[in-house]
Image (cartoon, grey):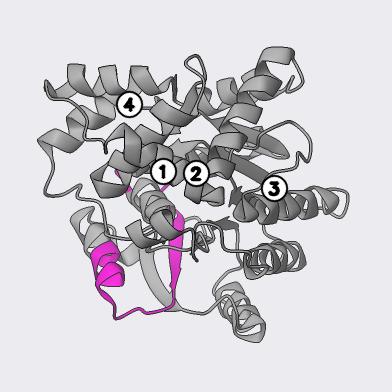
Amino acid sequence: MAAPRRNILVVGATGKQGGATVRALLAPGSPPDFHLWGLTRNSAGTLAKGIADDARRLHAEERFQLVEGDLEDAEGVRKLFETISAEGGIWGVFIAIAFPGLGVKDDRERDQGIMLASLALEFGVQAFVYSSALQPAADDAETPEYSRLSKQAIERHCKSLTEKGLKWTIIQPGFFMENLSGTLGSIAVSLFLEGLKKDTTICLIASEDIGRVAAGVFADHEKYVHKVVGLAADPLTAQQIVDAHQRAVGTPITRVPSVLAKLLLWLNADARGILHDIEMHQHTRNTGAFPTFEEEVRLGHSVCKLQTFEEWVRTQHENSAAAATQPGWNKVSLVKVLTGRS
């Protein structure tokens, strides 16, 4: 008799992290009893069709099902949990909540994460994996980046449910390598060069590796219960980012003129806030005020091999058509960077 399937709800299945998690969980060699439910707001949209095509390409369409839902509709999300639970229970949940936008103060991210963690406890989820963000310090450090504040609140809520029985794992990705490509990437590189200290490192991670780590956590979930998994695959200074790109493809990384970067830093408080968080993280590591950082990062590297930035650039170059960045995928536009408006 076949073993009962383990249902895993992937919240944000059509996003960068959620899509990567779906692909990793359906890849050859993944546990065959995993059955994925990909939550999306529009199951008929282009992104939804793309992730369904990925499941077919992996010959795993029978283990993947798209479901529509809106995280702002709490009652609808509860009904979704009830529906999946009736199909054999909800064994696992992965959540990556959409970035609200640069400088956007939006409590919905916080409220949605807290709601999902509470539902996971109520429905007896055995593996709750929350993708947060690398924090500036070990404890609740002040940060001008609003989305990071929401993520800190969700992390605290997950931990508060420990004694009640929630089996959580928190993944903390660093700065997405995807943010260093395209027009916005050219701005980011110049901002790093102009606004960070020469020896300050940016902890980089590829979104596809976030999915692979999440899949590894689910595959060996008891090992990661109540653990924070830091994802800093390749800590590089701004100049090292430039050098790695040159080595990877033999051409300079695209960047805007330094005078424009300086102007942006003067005009845009949110851009300054991101650099502030990076500098704070560097300071707490150097002073020993973040004593768990190295252990958390080692744990991340123990799950699977993570790409270096140089490897990622080379792969992007070789597969440029398939790996093209989705315009506006992280809800940051050039206008927002220039004006500081949300």
Tell me which numbered mark, 3 or 2, is placed earlier along the sequence.
Answer: 3
Side (left or right) of 135 relative to 194: right
Q: Position of residue 64 (x, y in %)?
A: 36, 65
Residue shown at 37%/39% (left/top)? 261
Circle 2 crowding by C-alpha within 10 Å: few under 14, some 14–19, many from 20: few
Q: CA distance from mark 1 to mark 4?
A: 27 Å
Report the magenta residues as a range.
27-52
42 in the magenta segment: yes
Q: Mark 3, mark 1: which one is toward the viewer?
A: 1
Q: CA distance from mark 1 to mark 2?
A: 5 Å
Residue shown at 75%/42% (left/top)? 142
The numbered disc on residue 266 is 2
Q: Position of residue 322 (x, y in %)?
A: 15, 49
Tell me which numbered mark, 4 or 2, is placed earlier along the sequence.
Answer: 2
Amino acid type shown at disc 2: Trp
Q: CA distance from mark 3 to mark 1?
A: 43 Å
Q: Vertical placement of 249 versus 18: above or below?
A: above
| Residue contact at pointers 3 and 2, CB within 8 angstroms | no
Q: Which residue is mark 4?
A: 309
Q: Which residue is mark 1?
A: 263
Amino acid type shown at disc 1: Leu
